[in-house]
Amino acid sequence: MNVESIVVAAVPSTSLLGVIIYLLKNPEKAEKWGALFARGFAGLSDASERRSVSGEIQSDINTFAKDVTGKVDASILPYGIKIKWEKSDNVSYESFVSEGQVVVRMRNHRNQARNLALATVAYVQAGFLPDARPHFDQEVSNAMDTAMARKILLDRRRSDALSIFNKEMLTEQTPMAARMSKIMQDLDAKGLFNEMLLREMADLGKRLTGIAPTEDSRKEIRDFVVFCEKLTEKEPGEDVSPDFKKKLLRVSIVLIAKSKTYAERGVMPHLNWVDKCLKEEMDSIYICATGPHIRAARELDALLQSYQSVRRIAEHSEKVLGQKGEIVNGICIVYHRLA
């Protein structure tokens, strides 16, 4: 065999090996491809149809979970999902954790959007922030689950499933739970639901693992969610207290939003604020800015990177809702104080 023949023969093998490695590293993609393959045989048997439906649902949810855990914290959605179809009419859905996955038992509806909405609700109830969840009161838990389920369906661009969720699956909320749901929805529009609220809850869950929940811990988490309302309702030029200082959560939000301050004094007022936060032993500092103020945020970030008393945790940029309701570029940079 000449050299050209060897090279030609090796190319398909090399390509196949690359595909295999890719699928091993990204099992949610393998599920998607498997579902598409099964869809071609869905008309031949009920089993093929169920495999196609469950494969697509599992791929959608696992893709979202992998993205969130990779960007923020692995303990937010630490489990995959496995669908098990039930024939009994007595089972609407139920979910539980087994062998590192959320197992969702449910009936197969002909409406795929309804299947996805039900599976998402079941997955979130069993697999979302499992370490922190015991320390949520019922209203916080309800609001968190509602916000996350909506976020999954929006992220997967499944407006059909989101419509079913909103119309049929939202549990009746108390006024406070409804208020918290709105706070979380508004936080998400500003890019702070994942980057700040979920990050703090994930970190708190790790610190409280093995510790029995108390009324004090539940109240503090509830108070923190309500504190976030200040960030979502802040008007341009309005000063709000950006600190939350209690026993479990000590968080400061550095909102850079005044062009006049930056023009007159640069980032020194913000740097002085960070110094004050460190003296007061604030554990988390979030530097947030939008639009033209991102330049000042980056200047402050550059100065803080020379500090020995903090550790830079993450930086996240995305399109967010500005203070006047417009879509703008946003940035959030996270620092933790070193003990």
Image: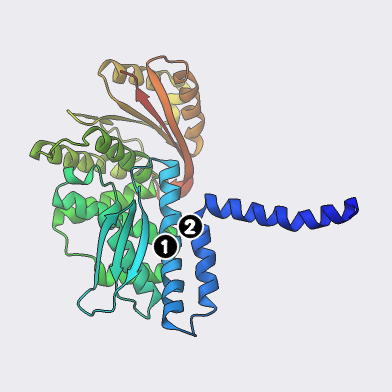
Q: How is the image coloured?
A: rainbow
Q: Position of residue 92 (x, y in %)?
A: 24, 73
Whether residue 103 sits left or right of residue 334 in the image: it is left
Q: Residue at x 56, y 55 (%)?
A: 23
272 relative position to 246: left or right? right
Distance between the alpha carbons at the discs numbered 2 and 1: 7 Å
Q: Residue at x 38, y 22 (%)?
A: 270
- Position of 29 relative to 187 (above/below): below
- The type of residue carrying mark 2 is Glu
Q: Quadrant of the N terminus?
A: bottom right
In the rendered image, residue 18, in percent from the top left (x then y), is placed at 65, 52
From the image, which quarter does the C terminus lie in? top left
- Judging depth in this view, the residue of 112 and 27 nearest the camera is 27
Q: Which residue is mark 2?
A: 28
Q: Residue at x 52, y 80 (%)?
A: 41
Residue 61 place in picture, x, y as percent: 40, 59
The image's mark for residue 58 is 1
Taking the image as shown, residue 37 lies to the left or right of residue 339, namely right
- State the residue in front, 297 or 174: 174
Q: Residue furthest right?
A: 2
Amino acid type, callout 1: Gln
Classify 226 as above or below 139: above
- Residue 99 is labelled as none
Nearer to the camera, 6 or 14: 6
Sequence-wise, the earlier of marks 2 and 1 is 2
**Crowding at label 2, few (<14), some or many (≥20) Cα neighbours within 10 Å?**
many
**Residue in view at x 44 percent, y 33 percent:** 314
User: Label 1 near label 2: C-beta < 8 Å?
Assistant: yes
Mark 2 lies on a secondary structure that is helix
Which residue is the extreme one toward the left?
Answer: 215
How many neighbours does mark 1 have within 10 angstroms: few (below 14), some (14-19), or many (20 or more)?
many
Residue 136, x across and y down, in percent: 18, 46
